[in-house]
Image (spheres, rainbow, N blue to C red):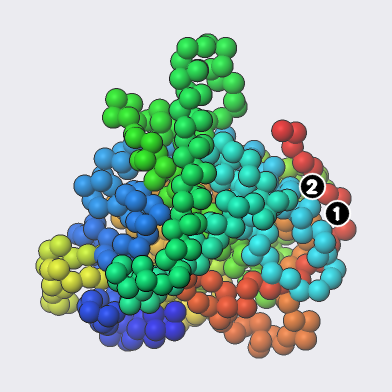
């Protein structure tokens, strides 16, 4: 991550662009919204940096070649409609109530890492909405599927960040290669079992009217099966798209919520404003968060956005340049090279964010439209942007609203000075941006009764 930060800062100083070599591959590094917009709209193919993800995801649409991505996106996009997302909020709320209970052990005690708790919360929420399966990660975190998923992400991150490990012939000689294959098989077997079960249930529903519409909502997997229509997805394609949703959704939301918790612990004034907003909406009620509440959580949303501006879960995006790209400056990015959109630097570029670009100030998102739409891209930008943006925001807002009504986040270190709390967080990169210090906070009980659970 240190190298990406240094090259990003260099790009800012150099009118938004610089260059670097990763092994034998040449990359243009971009930290300017106008240039990023041109590249991301002109060139849709992902670069070699994304190749390692194919080991698990195959041609899942997030990283697939354009010829595969385009028709699949047409099928998958309708599943993220507002109507479908609305049906999922009850599940997010149920799982948020479990999350709040799980955190009770730490109330008024020592510092702890919130990562495990937000990670298992998002895994439970996404497994239920994407697969229709209750994995109970929050209460049973040591299940083989969950352990394999975590280990796989760690191993693939190492390959992505170290060019020599991306050489298949070399990597297959290393012990980690066998671990990677073992974890992949376990993950695939689990998802394949779920896919076959859903396909069998669909056949049963066709032949038995009494089973139709038995559930109050349809999972992403069911919606994708229906959306594919005559161009029915194979079992392999269903596995690929399901894994994209689970992998991208779990990590992005967990990282975003965890970083937001840390920032709230460091900025008491901001946290107080969030709590005031919650009190206006919920009063003294212990009722769970509903879909109707989410649009009202305007200040909480700005806090999440400002956190994701400074600590974007996915800090870089890469593109293969399949044509010459001419920039307004007169510079030409040559065909067959690659480009890295350095989102970490773009989100700190004073041209778009002002002299206080490095400061945490949520109010900036209430001050009117951005100077350029590509200045803020925590979920990518352009035709290949993330379909799950609204889904992720709903997950994070529901979880944080539930937890903050019951607890107050405070700094992990009681003796921390104001200067300490204003220092940037130390970060690293392994598929997602992570907190080097593992999202440590303390929580204090607000003295409220437990948030109501929803009957399931």
Of residues 429 and 306, which is closer to you in this image? Answer: 429
Tell me the residue that label 2 is attached to.
451
Query: Quarter holding the N terminus?
Result: bottom left
Q: Which residue is drawn at 73% across and 58% down?
A: 404
Tell me the residue that label 1 is attached to.
448
Of residues 264 and 112, which is closer to you in this image? Answer: 112
Task: Give the x, y percent position of residue 166.
Answer: 33, 70
Of residues 283 and 157, which is closer to you in this image? Answer: 157
Decide: few, some or many residues near mark 1? Use Cα within 10 Å; few <14, some 14-19, many ≥20.
Answer: few
* Secondary structure beneath label 2: loop
In the displayed structure, would residue 156 be above or below residue 389?
Answer: below
Of residues 393 and 374, which is closer to you in this image? Answer: 393
Residue 256 in sight here: no
Q: Is 357 left or right of 17, judged from the image as shown?
A: right
* Secondary structure beneath label 1: loop
Q: Residue at x 32, y 43 (%)?
A: 73
| For the residues bearing labels 1 and 2, Cβ distance under 8 angstroms | yes
Q: Residue at x 48, y 25 (%)?
A: 200
In the displayed structure, would residue 396 be above or below residue 214?
Answer: below
Task: Give the x, y percent position of residue 30.
Answer: 29, 74
């Amino acid at each position: 991550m240190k190298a990406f930060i240094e090259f990003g800062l260099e790009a800012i100083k150099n009118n938004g662009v610089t260059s670097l070599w990763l092994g034998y591959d040449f990359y243009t590094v971009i930290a300017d919204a106008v240039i990023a917009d041109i590249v991301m709209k002109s060139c849709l193919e992902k670069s070699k940096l994304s190749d390692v993800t194919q080991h698990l995801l195959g041609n899942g649409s997030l990283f697939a070649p354009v010829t595969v991505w385009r028709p699949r996106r047409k099928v998958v996009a309708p599943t993220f409609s507002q109507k479908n997302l609305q049906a999922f909020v009850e599940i997010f709320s149920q799982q948020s109530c479990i999350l709040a209970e799980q955190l009770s052990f730490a109330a008024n005690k020592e510092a702890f890492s919130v990562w495990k708790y937000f990670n298992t919360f998002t895994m439970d929420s996404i497994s239920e909405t994407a697969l229709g399966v209750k994995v109970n990660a929050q209460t049973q975190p040591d299940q083989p599927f969950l352990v394999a998923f975590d280990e796989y992400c760690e191993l693939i991150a190492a390959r992505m960040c170290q060019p020599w490990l991306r050489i298949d012939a070399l990597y297959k000689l290393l012990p980690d290669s066998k671990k990677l294959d073992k974890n992949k098989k376990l993950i695939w077997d689990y998802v394949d079992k779920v896919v076959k079960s859903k396909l069998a249930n669909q056949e049963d529903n066709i032949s038995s009217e009494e089973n139709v519409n038995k559930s109050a909502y349809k999972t992403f997997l069911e919606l994708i099966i229906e959306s594919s229509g005559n161009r029915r997805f194979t079992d392999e394609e269903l596995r690929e798209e399901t894994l994209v949703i689970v992998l991208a959704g779990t990590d992005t939301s967990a990282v975003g919520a965890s970083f937001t918790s840390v920032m709230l612990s460091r900025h008491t004034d901001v946290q107080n404003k969030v709590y005031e907003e919650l009190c206006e909406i919920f009063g003294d009620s212990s009722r769970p968060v509903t879909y109707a509440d989410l649009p009202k959580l305007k200040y909480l949303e700005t806090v999440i956005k400002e956190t994701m501006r400074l600590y974007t879960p996915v800090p870089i995006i890469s593109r293969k340049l399949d044509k010459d790209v001419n920039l307004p400056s007169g510079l030409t990015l040559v065909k067959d090279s690659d480009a890295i959109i350095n989102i970490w630097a773009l989100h700190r570029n004073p041209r778009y964010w002002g002299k206080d670009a490095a400061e945490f100030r949520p109010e900036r998102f209430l001050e009117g439209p951005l100077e350029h739409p590509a200045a803020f891209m925590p979920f990518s930008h352009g035709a290949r942007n993330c379909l799950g943006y609204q889904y992720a925001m709903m997950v994070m807002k529901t979880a944080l609203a539930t937890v903050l009504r019951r607890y107050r986040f405070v700094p992990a270190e009681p003796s921390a000075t104001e200067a300490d709390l204003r220092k940037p967080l130390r970060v690293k990169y392994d598929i997602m941006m992570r907190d080097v210090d593992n999202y440590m906070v303390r929580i204090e009980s607000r003295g409220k009764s437990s948030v109501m659970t929803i009957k399931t």
